[in-house]
Image (tube, helix red, strand yellow):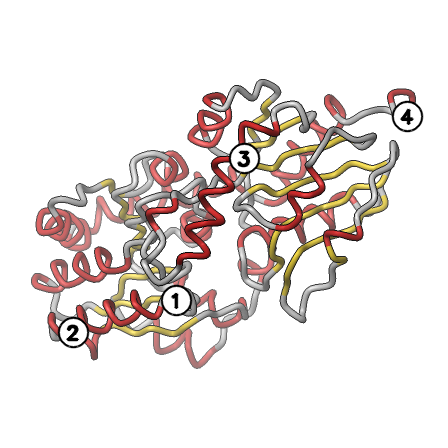
Amino acid sequence: MRINLMTACLTAGDAIGHYITMLDSAFSPRHEVAVFADLGTRDRSFLPSHAYVATPDDLLWFHYSIYSENFACLSRRGPDFKIMDFHGVCPPELYADDEPEMKRLAALGLQRLPAFREVFDLCLVHSDYSEQVLREARYERIVKTPLAIGRALAEAEENPFLAERLSQLEYLLFVGRVTKQKDILGAIELFARVRERRPQLKMWIIGDRSGSAQYQRQISDLLARLGIERHVGLTGRLTDPTLLKPFFKHARFLVMLSRWESFCVPVVEAMGFGVPTVTSERTCVAETMGGTGLVVERSDLAGAGERVAALLENGRQYDDLRRRCIERATLFTEPRMIERLFEVEKRYFPSKSER
């Protein structure tokens, strides 16, 4: 059996890209594996999606997140076994006004979802929220599997220059795409509130800023209005684990005030270093955290800031959160994820006699 992993865009540092790499490593010793994408960065090896030709010996593992050209592979039920790995579709209204194409693709991804009920043989989800979305679209054969942190970040050697300097700072951290969906403006306002009680506090915002120029201007304007430009660092995208690791390791809180998520890998990465998350997203992020962080009200960032500051000042409670983070992170290791996927393979993948 050939396993064909397909996604819209294969990018270094992307959560789906990391996941596909882990799937490739796990299944390639036992099966022929190919990776397909519509687009990708030069550091990733893949075949163009339009080159995929289905046969009875093929399994198409389709990563569903936004409408793209590779939907042509789903036009009908073919001879291959098709798996939808559902990562959720960001609501179109959560893209900025200067991202009309992303709004259009997200809307199409949601609109077309019910049409593929009879195309996919199996659906994989990674949160209760994602399962609910598929149930509402009347999908039936759904299996929940964990996502994993991956070994690269945990096993990386820290950059010694960064590690030394970051260990001397008290800071909040955001990691992810710097977009309207992630509500970076809210995260900055929360930081400013906490800083009223802890003036030594800093914040680092790590992630791709290429999406919306309009939203980046709003971030700059807010930093200037609050007078905290010198206390918030925007690094841009970091894909080198030796650089990313010390930022996670020495942070006091990960701030994730996203207006929508379907899992949120940075929360798990932070947990692996004993770093709790503060969030206002009560579905996926709260589920992923599992009681290891702080859930606040978006409508009361002043009160949220007080709660974060109070935890930082209460060493016993904060250390308890750190302990729970490290314990819960063991649920999201790469070996555990692969073990679960092998169970799915044994139970659901077609045998030779069925192909």
Q: In the image, what residue occupies the spot 68% across and 37% down?
A: 74
Q: Check disc 2 and report its element: helix, strand or loop.
A: loop
Residue ID for mark 2: 228
Measure how far apart labels 4 and 1 are at the Cα level: 46 Å
Measure how far apart labels 4 and 3 are at the Cα level: 32 Å
Q: Position of residue 314 (x, y in %)?
A: 16, 50
Q: Mark 1 or mark 2: which comes first in sequence?
A: 1
Residue ID for mark 1: 206
Measure how far apart labels 4 and 2 are at the Cα level: 62 Å
Asked if the residue under mark 2 is in contact with the one under mark 3, i.e. CB atoms within 8 Å, the reply is no
The circle on residue 114 is none
Residue ID for mark 4: 352
Instruction: Tell which tag, 3 or 2, sits nearer the viewer.
Output: 3
Q: Is 156 in front, or is 46?
A: 46
Q: Is 347 in front, or is 40?
A: 40
Q: Mark 3 or mark 2: which comes first in sequence?
A: 3
Residue ID for mark 3: 112
Q: Mark 3 or mark 1: which comes first in sequence?
A: 3
